[in-house]
Image (cartoon, rainbow, N blue to C red):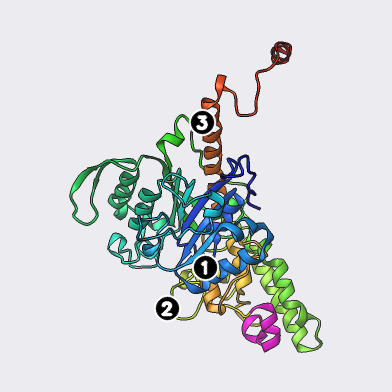
Amino acid sequence: MGPQPHQEDPTGPSVDVLTSIEICAGAGGQAIGLHQAGFNHLALVEIDPHAVETLRINIRSLEEWSWEREYCDVISGDVNNFSPIPRGEGRESDVRKGQAYLGRPLARGDLDLLAGGVPCPPFSHAGKQLGKDDERDLFPRILELADELHPKAVMIENVRGIKDAKFEEYREYIMARLAGGLAKHPVTGIEEELDGLGYDICEWEVLEASDFGVPQLRPRAVLVAIRRDVLGDLKFVWPTATGSPRSAFDALEESMDLRYAPYLEMSGDVARLAKQRLGRWKEKAQMAESRKDFGVAPTLVGGSKKHGGADLGPSRAKAAWALLGVSGVGVANSHEESVKKKSQDRDLFREAGPMLTVEQAAIIQGFPDNWKFSGGKTAQYRQVGNAFPPPVAAAVGKAIAEVLHAARKRDRRESAPDGLLPRQSAPAPADSVDDRDSARA
């Protein structure tokens, strides 16, 4: 649950709350992780109507999202039209609900974190890798918003492909826009000295989702930049692996048992076939745990509106799923729908193994069990398949939050008389003696 506002001053925001705005929010993978890390969202911007409805229904129904229910705008539309700060008399801020928390419209420098999983097709190995020449490249827009909002930190997530050598100049330009320095303009090709926006780049790391408890490989490139005046003498530390990788078998066993259960309770051939197919899946998935990848699932592929129905990716991905006993040729109906429509032959009894449901794909991505998806099966699967795994976003978010909280504490200490934090008083002489004696002990 995100931190609830504790008002030291009833007319202004709490010093304990970290605020964020996320663009290209999708179905909320990154938003969930940042929320778990302690960030409260003032706005989530997304163009896909199904994903927008997913965000809205979960914020509306889940108790842990009560802060966002009151103060967060879920904005449906093109991020190029998003206006977070009022523009004179002509344009009000699109961040409206948050004004009740802030006590006024959002202003430059107010925001703690600007985050975005900008579209990956320009840099994806599965696409044409057009980079800056792809109309779906939204790096220019997030840089414009960083300039306009001047948040204390910026977090940008993308596919690993952006770290390829062919995009080195573009990466250098993005970093120079934030931090200053010499870089080639991506359109003109002219090398120029950029002033930057006053940020320090905390590197551009590739993080493996499997290092953070996600039963899937899913490498993601994450850029973190923190405003220079905020970072000061502090240091941002990238999160490290949280433990041993979690296998797909461990993640999916309970849900697979649930899916086969109605047929195991039947008599005759159906029960025998269900027992045989479930046993075969368990055997394959457990055997995969002994491989060097520990039976972790391959990267889910969400696809796009331009392609046909949902499946688990190209031939290589399907082959990797086959080693886990899963058919990757499509997505199964939900457990309830499969029973209702009697689609078990398609969903569960294939010779190649069961297909995953949307709910199981969400498990593979690390979504919480109570997060629901809007739209038809294909629309839901695309939302899941294109998401940033929440546990990875949470790990990075916590690392950013630690710096921001430390900076606030440092700044309050420096501004307080005699270096004391607000509401502190100098220790009595006897207390000081006791403290020194304790330190020597």
In the rendered structure, which segment of residues is drawn in magenta?
Answer: 334-348
Dot 2 amino acid type: His
Dot 1 amino acid type: Gly
Decide whether residue 340 is among the magenta residues: yes
Residue at x-position 52% and y-position 43%: 400
Decide whether residue 329 is among the magenta residues: no
Residue at x-position 37% and y-position 60%: 91
Category of crowding for the residue at label 3, using alpha-carbon neighbours closer than 10 angstroms: few (below 14), some (14–19), many (at least 20): some
**Residue 411 tag number:** 3
Above or below, 258 relative to 225? below
Where residue 361 appears, x then y in whole percent? 59, 69
Q: N-terminal of the two: label 1 or label 2?
A: 2
- Give the residue pinned by disc 1: 385
Number of marks in the rendered image: 3
**Could you tell me if the residues under marks 3 and 2 are in contact, i.e. CB atoms within 8 Å?**
no
Q: Is 141 left or right of 273, judged from the image as shown?
A: left
> Looking at the image, can residue 257 be seen?
yes
Q: N-terminal of the two: label 3 or label 2?
A: 2
**Could you tell me if the residues under marks 1 and 2 are in contact, i.e. CB atoms within 8 Å?**
no
Mark 1 falls on what kind of element?
helix
Dot 3 amino acid type: Asp
Where residue 253 appears, x then y in whole percent? 70, 67
Q: Is 48 left or right of 17, judged from the image as shown?
A: left
- Give the residue pinned by disc 2: 307
**Residue 174 tag number:** none
Camera-nearest residue between 270 and 367: 367
- Residue 53, quarter of the rendered image: bottom right
Category of crowding for the residue at label 2, using alpha-carbon neighbours closer than 10 angstroms: few (below 14), some (14–19), many (at least 20): few
Can you say which quadrant of the picture contains the C terminus?
top right
